[in-house]
């Protein structure tokens, strides 16, 4: 998808998503994580769709990996859920040797993603 189309979808759905999830995080678009960090890509580029930063209260969408309206909406929901979670608890779970698939915060965010269709643009 082109960045212009992604921006159009974000502008249309994010106000609803952020209101429903009581998130005031700002959204920024980058082609990928390396673009955001302004570094040379490592071998085997990261496949992340999005990321939430507790430090900046921003959701970063990575446009290289967003191929549909569904991808965008799921990513926004997922990261809005994280914006309401505790960073300290998030990190503590990882210190307990939990991987991404078994992390309670990731499970919660992925569960909420299944509601993406509620935000599908009806034109």
Image (spheres, rainbow, N blue to C red):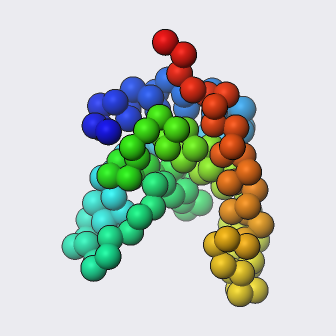
Residue 25 location, x and y as percent? 57, 44
Count of numbered tags: 0
98 left or right, relative to 36? right
Q: Work out whether residue 22 or residue 4 is closer to the camera in this orientation and state it.
A: 4
Q: Is residue 36 visible?
A: no
Question: Percent x, y for residue 23?
Answer: 66, 41
Residue 7: give x, y in percent of width and height.
38, 32
Q: Quadrant of residue 97?
A: bottom right
- In this rendering, would 43 be left or right of 9? left
Depth check, front residue: 18 or 110:
110
Q: Quadrant of the N terminus?
A: top left
Residue 26's x, y, as percent?
Answer: 51, 42
Question: Residue most toward the top?
Answer: 123
- Outermost residue toward the left in this view: 40
Taking the spot 68% from the left edge, 54% from the top edge, the residue there is: 110
Judge whether 100 appears above or below 2 on screen: below
Name the residue rendered at 51%, 49% in the picture.
59
Q: Quadrant of residue 99?
A: bottom right
Residue in the picture at 34% in, 30% down: 5
- Where residue 118 sits, quadrant-wise, is top right
Question: Would you say residue 87 is visible in this rendering?
Answer: yes
Say which residue appears at 44% left-offset and 29% top-offset: 9
In the image, is 65 to the left or to the right of 91?
left
Q: Is residue 9 above or below residue 37?
A: above
């Amino acid at each position: 998808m082109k960045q212009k189309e992604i921006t159009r979808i974000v502008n249309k759905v994010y106000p609803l998503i952020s209101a429903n999830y009581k998130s005031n995080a700002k959204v920024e678009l980058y082609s990928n994580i390396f673009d955001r960090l302004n570094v040379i890509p490592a071998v085997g580029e990261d496949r992340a769709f999005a990321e939430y930063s507790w430090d900046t209260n921003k959701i970063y969408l990575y446009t290289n990996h967003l191929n549909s309206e569904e991808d965008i909406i799921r990513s926004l929901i997922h990261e809005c859920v994280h914006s309401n979670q505790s960073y300290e608890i998030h990190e503590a779970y990882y210190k307990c040797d939990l991987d991404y698939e078994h992390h309670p915060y990731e499970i919660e965010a992925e569960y909420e993603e299944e509601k993406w269709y509620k935000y599908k643009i009806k034109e």
